[in-house]
Image (tube, rainbow, N blue to C red):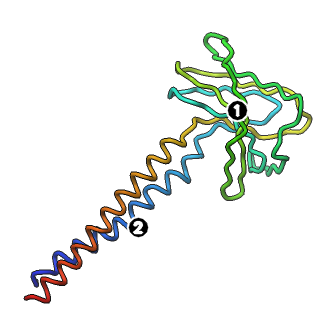
Amino acid sequence: MKAGIKLIIAGVSLLILGVIVVPMAIVLPLILGDKNKEKFVIPGSTQVMLEEAGRYYLWNDYQTIYGGRSYNRSESIPDGIEISIRNVETDQLFNFIGDTAISSSGGSSSKNSIGYIDVKTLGSVRIEILGGTEERIFSFSRFRLRSMFGLILGGLALSMALSFSGAGLIIWGIVKIIKS
């Protein structure tokens, strides 16, 4: 085998890792990560087990499919909706902070934030939504924007490093072949 062939093969492998594999390893969890949210019909209630401390958002899934049925509602929630989120073990009410600044769309689903709670102790919470005349879908999930940006930036850096290293090895391999 010629002197530079191994370098070219290693370079192509690194280039493929940097251009295809690493970006897919980042994009797939971001796309599939939203599946872990707890959806429920309102007016109504649900109970959710919180396994991590952090900020949890209540979402208005105004365009979604749930239980085999499609929902296409207004982005704004109707007047008179009462929201209570309680710790099931202590029956203590969480401080619910209204925050409608975040929205998200993907595929056939669109949602916007209603507000959040900050959770320090783990356990089960009961979310109860009263009021409103039409069925809507709400969801409840942990806020992951910071970790998502960290994953994207770290993946981008790794992808670039692998791609540049691969390109460098390919060039070095070609130079070795030409010289020999």
Q: Report how far apart the C-alphas of labels 1 and 2 lie in the structure.
A: 37 Å
| Discs 1/2, front | 1
Quadrant containing the C terminus in the rendered view: bottom left
- Quadrant of the rendered image containing residue 157: bottom left
Total number of numbered discs in the rendering: 2
- Give the amino acid at mark 1: Gly
Q: Is residue 121 left or right of residue 80?
A: left
Which residue lies under the disc numbered 1?
A: 115
Residue, far top: 90
Q: Position of residue 145 (x, y in %)?
A: 54, 43
Which residue lies under the disc numbered 2?
A: 20
Q: Residue at x 61, y 31 (%)?
A: 56
Q: Residue at x 62, y 10 (%)?
A: 90
In depth, the one of 177 and 21 nearer the eye is 177
Q: Position of residue 103 (x, y in %)?
A: 69, 47
Q: Residue at x 10, y 84 (%)?
A: 2
In depth, the one of 178 and 17 nearer the eye is 178
Residue 35: give its label: none
Residue, far right: 133
Q: Secondary structure at mark 2?
A: helix
Q: Secondary structure at mark 1?
A: strand
Q: Is residue 102 left or right of residue 153?
A: right
Q: Earlier in the sequence, mark 1 or mark 2?
A: 2
